[in-house]
Image (tube, grey):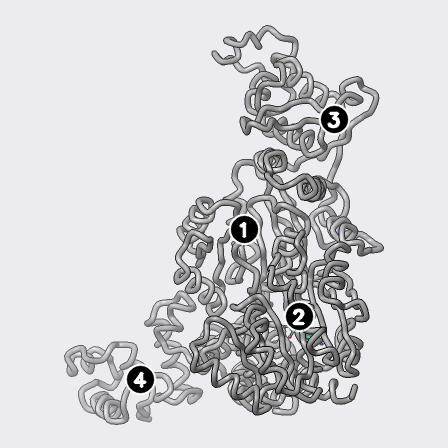
Amino acid sequence: MEDKALHILNNTFGYSAFRQNQKDIIEQLINGNDAVVLMPTGGGKSLCYQIPAMAREGVGIIISPLIALMQDQVTALEQLGVKAAFLNSTLDAASAGEIEHRLLHGDLDLLYVAPERLMTDRFLNLLENTPIALFAIDEAHCVSQWGHDFRPEYIQLSILHERFPNIPRIALTATADEATRREIIQRLALENAELFVSGFDRPNICYRIAQNQGNAKDQLLRFILNEHENDAGIVYCLSRKKVEQTADWLCKKGLKALPYHAGLSAQIRQQHQHRFLTEDSVIIVATIAFGMGIDKPDVRFVAHLNLPKSIEAYYQETGRAGRDGLPSNAWMMYGLQDVIMLKQMMQTSEADDAHKRVEHHKLESMLGFTEITTCRRQALLKYFDDHLEQPCGNCDTCLIPVETWDATVVAQKALSCVYKTKQRFGVNYLIDVLLGKDMARIKQFGHDQISVYGIGKELDANQWRSIYRQLIARNLLSVDIEGHGNLRLTEQCRPVLRGDVSLQLRKENKQSKSANRGRKSFNSVKDADKALWEALRTCRKTLADQADVPPYVIFHDATLMEMLERQPQTHDQFSKMTGVGEKKLEAYANQFLEVIKQHIKSSTNPTSSSETIEETLLLLRSGMNANEIATHRNLKITTIFNHLAQCIEMGELELQQAVDLSEQEIKTIQNAFLSFSDEDRKLKPVYEAFEGAFDYGLLQCVRASVDIPM
Ligand code: ADP
Ligand code: ZN
């Protein structure tokens, strides 16, 4: 049995070894037992049910709340030659009928269904008459009433256990906390299931959090241009308005940014999501409405322009980066305004007391997380009861250790200012008083007469803002409930005011260096390899367009990287690449091997043209035409034809491959060169002879194919 699983892993999926717990989980199911699986995003949960469903007799039923994801998964499985289908509300009656027919005739290995469809009597009866390999309950945390993804239909899923007691079940989630875990087990009647908990670390994600110093958008742009040019990414904002503004602004700066929020029509949302999945280097700017059910493996960065509401949300949202395991960035900007807003949200929440306590605790944890001065990853994992021995070396506080300073005296000034102005003002006013600003409003209240007026001139307004932010985050100050942003003293501030304890605060980097100095992400392919990398990507895009699937369904970036490194030259070598199974070997090996062959040929041939010509040639071979190459490389079309003509002249390229002309046209033009043109084979006379019907670029290529007289 175990061999069978490994065989499927190797031959169908093209992977050489199981990860973490995969093998044990698969074995558990193949042997007919239940499993509860907690594994981080990108950990490889899908294989845990896909392989046993294929290895066991009958069809595997996968219950998922994410309709968009079903389509993706099925498309990807079909590419691997697996018999998979989905049933949900997006199908018309005829298509649904056809799938039911396949189900009853044993023509499916895997069937994805939405929970409400599964629960219908009709469907349950259908299942009674079908051999079933297993039930997989994906996103199992949706049973939790505490969670933000609660789905009432999930509660009813315990019925599976009652009606099909002998069919193994597996529940999977990436949500980590203990309470959710208990709820899943209890509500789904999985008391006898074995629990598999994988570590929650996502080592390929670099966590970075920086202070917003009033120029968040600029910092975001710099981050993207420096580290993620041409990469796909997600930018999260809190409000629809900010989503629109940010997307607009990024577009104006020349990036392909698309907005996504609940205020847009379903059609537009669908369209933007589709472009994100199928095109290269699209950035989605979204409210949190975007992400659930986005399974794109090569999202290289997730940026937050606002604080998420909890560490769970932060972990889940940042977790959408780098599912493929390649280096990725989780980048966040936050400031005083965020802290104030979150504090107010906490107080004005309309939830009942129990919920409120939970929310409160979550927000506090999130605030604490942003302000810590030690390793982010250690803190993040600790929150999920996971453990990391050493600081990670791949987060902002590890990369640029935070300096702290004894801020007791300035904190006392900041707190006194709140007290002396009767706890009735917001941060900006308080700072004006501390700085001793000459303002009518201050005079009107008589605050130019109090002892704190002008005692804070040793710091500037931004530094004071940072101090107030940290005091609020640490609960030494609270924010008013009415929403005016007035600050009040809390019990906790007394020892500081009295000078009984000293207070260490973060020293802010002026330029917020940490925001802009992460690890260079993997898009920094070595220059020498760039041409091949681009050619491989173009080849993949062409194949993806032909098959009408997203590029990553053809091959992941990781597989392309491997091609770049190992440059396979035979089918046998190609079959050893990660992610190349039997089906994909057969379907795609030739195209990629050809691209690699051309690359090797032109880079080892001493008489070969320069690198830039080689790049043009590679792009042409991977399916682009001259115009597309010019756009892609941002070169003039004449330059591209120049390259092509040189290739033709050197015998590296057939004329027919370079230009879109019929045999007849080629003949005619060639003859024209031989008869009208002078010995130098000038282009102009021929151009004029055809009255401009053929561009100079085309003529240049044809000329290159005309034998030069000795
Ligand atoms: P999850 O559902 O846990 O977020 P997926 O099942 O989508 O994760 O897997 C994440 C990525 O890892 C996918 O691209 C998958 O193909 C890949 N993967 C899973 N298991 C393995 C393995 N054993 N070897 C190599 N790649 C794997
Ligand atoms: Zn760290």
Q: Secondary structure at mark 3?
A: loop
Which residue is under mark 3?
407
Residue 506 shows which numbered tag? none
Picture quadrant where residue 26 is located? bottom right
Q: Amino acid at mark 1?
A: Tyr
Residue at the (69%, 59%) spot, across then down = 175
Q: Is residue 442 left or right of residue 400?
A: left
Which residue is under mark 4?
660
Residue 137 shows which numbered tag? 2
Q: Secondary structure at mark 4?
A: loop
Question: Could you tell which of marks 1 and 4 lies nearer the N-terminus?
Answer: 1
Residue at the (56%, 73%) spot, across then down = 120
Where in the figure is residue 306, as x and y percent of width and height? 57, 44
Q: Amino acid at mark 4?
A: Asp
Where in the figure is residue 199, as x and y percent of width and height? 78, 62
Dividing the image into 4 quarters, which one contains the N terminus? bottom right
Dividing the image into 4 quarters, which one contains the C terminus? bottom left
Q: Amino acid at mark 3?
A: Ala
Assign ligand 1 to one image quadrant: bottom right
User: Spatial distance from mark 3 to mark 2, Cα to Cα?
Assistant: 52 Å
Nearest to viewer (mark 2 / mark 4): 2
Picture quadrant where residue 302 is located? bottom right
Picture quadrant where residue 137 is located? bottom right
Nearest to viewer (mark 3 / mark 2): 2
Residue 236 shows which numbered tag? 1
Q: Is residue 301 above or below residue 336?
A: below
Residue at the (52%, 9%) spot, across then down = 443
